[in-house]
Image (spheres, rainbow, N blue to C red):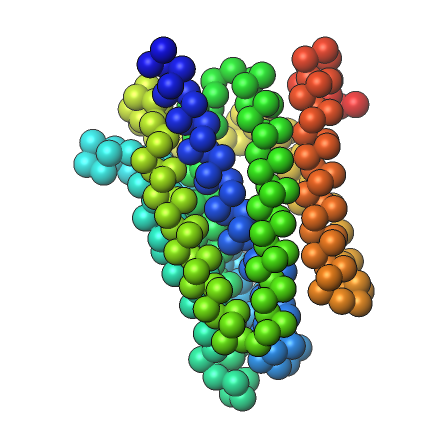
Amino acid sequence: LDQEKRRKKNYFGYYLGNFSWTILGGIFLLSYVDFFYDDLGLNDAYFNLALIIYAIINSINDPLLSIMSDRTDRKRWGSRRLIYIRWGGLAWCIFFVMTWFPWSYDNQLIIFFHFLISISLFDMGLSLVISCWMALLPEIAPDVNQRVKLSYIVGIITIIAGIFVVIFVSFKDFGIPVFQVMSIFVGIICFVLFYLVGTLVKEREEYMDDKPLPFFKGIIETVKSKSFMIYIGYNFFFVVNASIGIAYVFIYQLITPLNLMGFYLIMVFNATIANYLGMRFQRKMGMRSVILN
């Protein structure tokens, strides 16, 4: 009975984490281009330069943040993942709110630095929290069937969160001050949810005691892992495909914000259906056959 209660708490905490980061990520995705490019009038050269610099920063901080989590002394801090979801989530929410308070309305250089610093800090918070959140999955659901079911439910929660994203973004039509107030409200709510994740979910002791490999040896062992490299290749082309699709949407803009929001909801809905079909086929065919076919 105690194990079942613990399992339900773990799952519920995991769902709360998904709901919270979907809200923050969805609002940012649908708002940052319009805010900096249209509302603040950042010119093309500065906008593209900021994105290039951000891409470089992003490629560096992602692995470093994961290494930091793996090397965290759990005896000192109590966990390797939850501490970053809880307090990293607080920092992420602060970065989210700070994004929507302009440093300047007319100085292009200041707007450029505001844009660059905002997207870099926001992505750093996103990478830290979501990587730790994803690392919890094998701890709370060691069985592959449990993970598939969890992923399906996460897809449903993502759709629900997407509806809240659409509602929130619509407040931007009432002006930047209203949007700023709503961003503070959302930041507080999301932090509370991240804090609850750290309270409800418990890390498995056997995973917490794993000692990470030295940096360069870890890279060598990673490259030597055939299954992991195959997964990296799959993920690379998946990201390329998704990025091309998103770029297409932004280039052609879909005329109005309502259509852009509709695209977001359609994307989430399709992902949920795909998760459901994957869960059904996985039981009959196995995960490998589902991916290959």
- The x and y percentages for residue 77 are 23, 38
Give the quarter of the image for residue 46: bottom right
Question: Is 293 drawn above or below residue 238 in the view shown?
Answer: above
Question: Is 272 drawn above or below residue 99 in the view shown?
Answer: above
Q: Closer to the camera, 9 or 224?
A: 9
Res. 158 in view:
yes
- The x and y percentages for residue 238 are 69, 40
Q: How many marks?
A: 0
Question: Residue at the left extreme?
Answer: 76
- The x and y percentages for residue 146 are 54, 19
Image position of 180 (left or right of 73)? right
| Residue at screen point 73% across, 25% down | 277
Res. 135 in view:
no
Question: Is 10 drawn above or below residue 199 in the view shown?
Answer: above
- The x and y percentages for residue 95 are 42, 62
| Residue at screen point 72% across, 45% down | 267
Question: Is 229 drawn above or below residue 290 in the view shown?
Answer: below
Give the quarter of the image for residue 251: bottom right
**Quadrant of the frame with the C terminus:** top right
| Residue at screen point 68% across, 43% down | 268
| Residue at screen point 34% across, 37% down | 198
**Quadrant of the frame with the N terminus:** top left
